Image (cartoon, grey):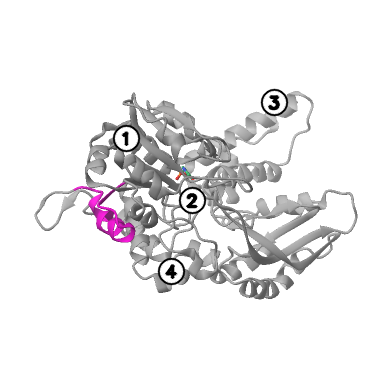
Amino acid sequence: MNPLSQLPSVDRLLSAAPLAALVDLHGRAVVTAMVRDVLAATRAAMKDGAPLPDEAGLLEKVGAGVTAKMRPGLRPVFNLTGTVLHTNLGRAPLPEEAVQALIAAARSPCALEYDIDSGGRGDRDDIVNELLCELTGAEAATVVNNNAAAVFLLLNTLAQKQQVIVSRGELIEIGGAFRVPDIMSRAGAKLVEVGTTNRTHLKDFAENITPRTAMLMKVHASNYAISGFTHAVPEAELAALAHQHDLPFVVDLGSGTLADLAAWGLPHEPTPAEAIAAGADLVTFSGDKLLGGPQAGLLVGRKDLIARIKKNPLKRCLRVGKLTLAALEAVLALYRDPDRLHLRVTAVRQLTRPEAAIRAAAERLLPALQNALAGLPVTAEIVALKSQIGSGSLPVDRLPSAGFAIRPQARRGGVLNRIEAALRGIAHPLRPVIGRIEDGALRLDLRCLDEGDEAAFAATLAALVVKP
Ligand SMILES: *Cc1c(COP(=O)(O)O)cnc(C)c1O
């Protein structure tokens, strides 16, 4: 008898109890398609000589296939990498106020471009315009998809077919795709680089101003630092030079925190308010870096220049949606109360979290980790760590932190890689745990594990299965 004819039918498998439950959960179409796929693959394997599998094995394959297929791609994770604003992990987690505002805006119609007072048409930028002006000292503001878009739109509006003068020390690349010279040429502007990598002087700018110059620009170096024999021209001097020639002076700040982080013992990061006060005509910065909000690019500055930027048809292509504006408004509102920022803005709270509090969390969680790793040839202990801010902010500064170091007892065996993979591969709906292997240890930095998440983290550890 042909063994292929002994394979169960699609209907028979579908009516088995485990699959009936999956049909309830995900619908008939997905489960039926997976049954067909598994049967086809089994038939092909049997033609190559594989034995007839038992029905339980087939059901298990279908179940695993459906579960993997229906798992969401955008899964929440535990960020224990030690990098707070981790671009690949979505940068700043939103404060609860922003999450609630975002949900409310998502659920129901909202006054996105509607003036409730007059009943007439509104402007979506007006939702955050006043807050941004108040917090930066600017005359006007507009919002686009991210800071790269903000820089692009600014250059395309004000410098198309003209020249933009930038110091050679500021021609940076950020996270692969954002490179100042490339953005400049795509925006239609001609880059004029002046000075040298380490030193640029006011006369380097002055000597290069021509009738074709559209603006002087300063780009915050963000993700690298030059030290030693260096010189950069202070913003106030660049602004004065630009204004003498009737040109705008623009600053791409990158991170652009709205509060002075030095108040919490963090290094000082330049703020948009400082740049505006120094004479900048336009400043751009990110919504989801040190600001701690949603992904967005914020442009603040002179009213006439913002008006021109808003008239560029590309603004329509780069604008943000209601979810972003809802979250952004809620986060900006928290900045009206600087005294409690470190409690309410999640990113600021995580960045300013005292080392002792992180170590105390490690002490609470060590038993759960040791239980999860029992029987494996490793040691797990609490260690001092150094967190990074991330997203190109304050690249040379490290924050004293604490967490776990898991080390193999023997040199060989790849056990660390197996533990790292098991933490990452934890089954949905539990959250994958993302750590870092470095210098022969798997490190889990607990800075970004909020206290309210400790129980969920312990439950995740309890479910850990490390493959032999
Ligand atoms: C991060 C950064 C950008 C890009 O901002 P996104 O919000 O990631 O698009 C541009 N310029 C500077 C100086 C930056 O630090």
Identify the residue under disc 3: 44
Spot occupied by residue 355 in the image (x, y as percentages of width and height)? 63, 71
Q: Residue at x 78, y 56 (%)?
A: 441
Q: Residue at x 34, y 47 (%)?
A: 280
Spot occupied by residue 131 in the image (x, y as percentages of width and height)? 29, 59
Q: Is residue 104 magenta?
A: no
Nearer to the camera, 31 or 134: 134
Mark 4 residue element: helix
Residue 230: image quadrant is: top right
Label 1 crowding class (10 Å Cα cut-off): few <14, some 14-19, many 20+? Answer: few
The answer for how far apart the CA atoms under marks 3 and 2 are is: 29 Å
Residue 341: give its label: 4
Q: Give the mark nearest the N terminus, 1 or 4.
A: 1
Residue 317: give its label: 1
Q: Residue at x 47, y 51 (%)?
A: 255
Residue 24: give its label: 2
In the rendered view, tell whether residue 38 sits above or below residue 405: above
The three-letter code of the residue at mark 1 reads Cys
